[in-house]
Image (cartoon, rainbow, N blue to C red):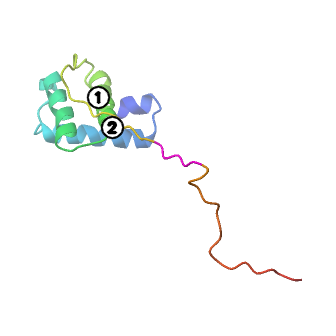
Amino acid sequence: MANEIKVRHYSRKTLKTYANWSRQFQRLLKNKSPAELGSEDVKAYLTYLDVNCHVASTTQNQAFNSLLFFYRNGLKREFGKLKDVPRAKKSRYVPMVLSREGSTPYLPTFPIRSIWW
């Protein structure tokens, strides 16, 4: 996998991150051989990340993309369709907007001295 990342001129951080996700994937599967890996293993891992680890959606997507790269470029095969895999949902942020009446002008808390030259 490292050679495939280097050939594509990905950054060192991408290599480090993808290798880390691959190691965690193998650790969860108790070092199952790459020839035995299938779509059920990927489903189990992504489910584990969502349900047990409560990762953010971007983290789960990063793990998914690293496994996709590992399967396509490292193992040279597809891991099939991933149906019924719980994916972490993006959280919705409601922006806090103040009205003109609710905002106060900035006043410094320290005394301002005039400087005479």
Q: Residues within 10 Å of mark 1 (few under 14, many from 20)?
A: many
Helix, strand or loop status at disc 1: helix
Between the residue at mark 2 and the residue at mark 1, the CA separation in whole angstroms equals 8 Å
Please name the residue that numbered disc 2 is placed on: 18
Which residue is rendered at x = 45% and y = 34% of the image?
Answer: 10
Which residue is rendered at x = 17% and y = 39% of the image?
Answer: 51
For the residues bearing labels 2 and 1, Cβ distance under 8 angstroms = yes
Q: Is residue 38 visible?
A: no
Range of magenta residues = 95-99
Mark sitting earlier along the chain (2/1): 2
Give, as a three-letter code, the residue at label 1: Phe
- The numbered dot on residue 70 is 1
Q: Position of residue 86 (x, y in %)?
A: 21, 29
Which quadrant of the figure contains the C terminus?
bottom right
Residue 96 lies, with reference to residue 73, above or below; the image says below
Q: Nearer the viewer, residue 92 or 18?
A: 92
In the image, taking residue 46 as reference, residue 16 lies left or right, namely right
Is residue 97 on the magenta stretch? yes
